[in-house]
Amino acid sequence: MFNLILFGPPGSGKGTQSEKLMAKYGLKHLSTGDLLRSEISRQTPLGKEAQNFMDKGLLVPDEVVIGMISSALDDNPDAKGFLFDGFPRTSDQAKALDKLLKLKEAPIAAMLALEVSEEELIKRLLKRGETSGRSDDDNENVIRARIVEYRDKTAVVADYYKQFDKVVMVKGEGTVDEIFERLCTEIDKRA
Ligand code: ADP
């Protein structure tokens, strides 16, 4: 199994690059944001709980997303690898993921961390908000709250993987294809 984490702040291009990476490498894409939005659109109890946090730009509680990822792993027993997008987003999520993957004897090969300036992030998210229909993208205060959550709770997740020498920084500015090439170069070194 070949598992990757695509890491970076909101608006760094994780979703866009994930689409291209899963097509090229045949990995199963697991995006906690997408899974949560699907729960919300089906108005499940989990979705209703998550929405209160997401509307404010806050992280959804760890136990909720960890449970969701655990089920998603169980639902895909034949996957040749997973591409985690938007997860783990806290140190406790990272530790929980390690435990889940240990059971499957399938560690993380690398964390690819997209680097994008804050100014560019806000510009991209506001632009996406014009067309995505995502309510958390069309309000600058909610966008700023998400970036604060990233700085306070998520940035440390990279430190967690650095101790295992798993982190690869990748410049997340340029064209979509240029960034994709940079990611592929790093992945091919490790595949
Ligand atoms: P973005 O990276 O652009 O913020 P996502 O779709 O990854 O978009 O996440 C949208 C929202 O979903 C986050 O602001 C957060 O509220 C919630 N969310 C997604 N993944 C997680 C996670 N792993 N832990 C906690 N909350 C999450």
Image (tube, rainbow, N blue to C red):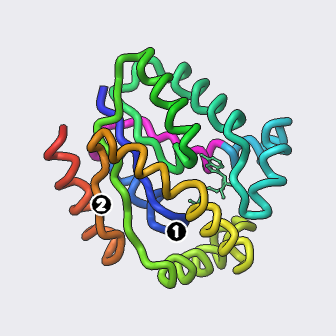
Could one spot residue 114 in this view of the protein?
yes
Which range of residues does the magenta coloring cover?
23-35
Taking the spot 33% from the left edge, 42% from the top edge, the residue there is 163
Residue that protrudes farthest toward the left in the picture = 189
Is 172 placed above or below 95 here?
A: below
Residue 188 in the image, given as x and y percentages of width and height: 16, 46
Q: Would residue 185 be found to the left or right of residue 151 on screen?
A: left
Taking the spot 75% from the left edge, 57% from the top edge, the residue there is 54
For badge 2, the amino acid type reads Met
Few, some or many C-alpha atoms within 10 Å of disc 2 (few <14, some 14-19, many ≥20)?
some
Per the image, the residue denoted by label 2 is 169
Task: Choose between 117 and 68: the one closer to the eye.
Answer: 117
Taking the spot 49% from the left edge, 58% from the top edge, the residue there is 155
Residue 46 in the image, given as x and y percentages of width and height: 79, 37
Residue 103 in the image, given as x and y percentages of width and height: 44, 15
Magenta-span inclusion, residue 28: yes
Few, some or many C-alpha atoms within 10 Å of disc 1 (few <14, some 14-19, many ≥20)?
many
Choose mark 2 or mark 1, whichever is in front: 2
Give the mark, 2 or 1, whose residue is nearer the N terminus: 1
